Image (cartoon, helix red, strand yellow):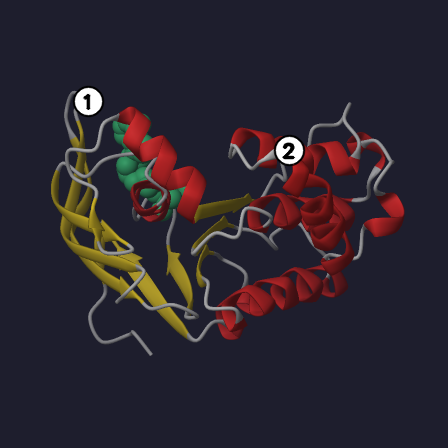
Amino acid sequence: MSVVEVRDVRRTYPTSPPVHALLGVDLTVAAGERTAILGQSGSGKSTLLNVLGLLDEPTSGTYRLLGEDTAGYDGAARDRLRSRALGFVFQESHVLGHRTVAENVLLKLVAAAVPRSERAPLVADVLHRVGLDHRADALGRLLSGGEKQRLAVARAVVTQPRLLLADEPTGNLDDGNAATVLDLFDEQARAGVAVVVITHDPRTASWADRTVRLVDGRIEPGVEA
Ligand SMILES: Nc1ncnc2c1ncn2[C@@H]1O[C@H](COP(=O)(O)OP(=O)(O)OP(=O)(O)O)[C@@H](O)[C@H]1O
């Protein structure tokens, strides 16, 4: 079973005039696959990522996540599936500056309704994996840019998602920190997580198993590797 199965997905924003941001996208992503989505500004990348992340609904077409057809899911059902199956990493890490590193991760587990007794070991394990165990008690705002992004990855993966979605996760990072973030994504992919990354960053595009290019709301034929 594929993690992601998108069939003929269209998304029109009902503005005046309407904007046809996605014009019939097909995309399948398997467990453990690393996919980079490329495309010029305005080509529909964020719109597609929002659909994949259950943050937005297609105007038409189908989106199956882990075999579940998400059409007709109400907000609560989408929230549950998102919390159970998805992890997000953005260019801006959205770290809570006034909370400690450990609290930043812990709050994700609380939001995902992970039982209290399981939380501390999960926090310790993920902070170790991203190399932030020694910073567990530091306030988020005191972290460097690279540390913040590693914390963002920790928060995204601590709930053990099946699909990891990232929007320009390495755009602001130097080579060393970009490589560290991509190594963490590799670890996820080896564990069977499907990783989908929007990027303009050649380092990240060449890291992926395949690249998909959006042009004016459509996947450009023939460039999938
Ligand atoms: N909420 C919205 N309402 C109306 N139009 C929107 C909305 N969000 C995006 N659009 C339009 O939809 C099209 C696709 O936008 P989208 O943000 O998906 O592109 P993108 O490839 O992610 O661009 P960028 O690389 O600049 O982030 C653009 O024409 C954009 O202006």
Indicate which label's residue lies in the foreground, 2 or 1. Answer: 2
Query: Residue drawn at (61%, 65%), measured in percent from left and top?
Result: 182
Residue at mark 1: 15
Say whether mark 1 is within 8 Å of ligand 1.
yes
Question: With 219 as the anchor, is 32 left or right in this view?
Answer: right
Q: How many numbered badges does the structure rendering display?
A: 2
Q: Indicate the amino acid at tag 1.
A: Thr
Question: With 21 as the anchor, is 96 left or right in this view?
Answer: right
Furthest residue toward bottom: 225
Residue 87 location (% of width, % of height): 49, 47
Residue 210 location (% of width, % of height): 39, 73
Viewer-nearest residue: 216 or 12: 12
Residue 145 location (% of width, % of height): 75, 45
Q: Indicate the amino acid at tag 2.
A: Arg
Mark 1, residues whose alpha carbon is within 10 Å: few (<14), some, or many (≥20)?
Answer: few
Query: Residue drawn at (22%, 76%), measured in percent from left and top?
Result: 222
Residue at mark 2: 116
Residue 187 position (above or below residue 128) = below
The label number, if any, that marks residue 127 in the structure image? none
Viewer-nearest residue: 50 or 69: 69
Quarter for ligand 1?
top left
Mark 2, residues whose alpha carbon is within 10 Å: few (<14), some, or many (≥20)?
Answer: few
> Marks 2/1: CA distance?
45 Å
Query: Residue drawn at (72%, 48%), measured in percent from left and top?
Result: 121
Question: With 11 as the anchor, is 123 left or right in this view?
Answer: right
Residue 23 location (% of width, % of height): 14, 48
Query: Residue drawn at (23%, 27%), measured in percent from left and top?
Result: 74
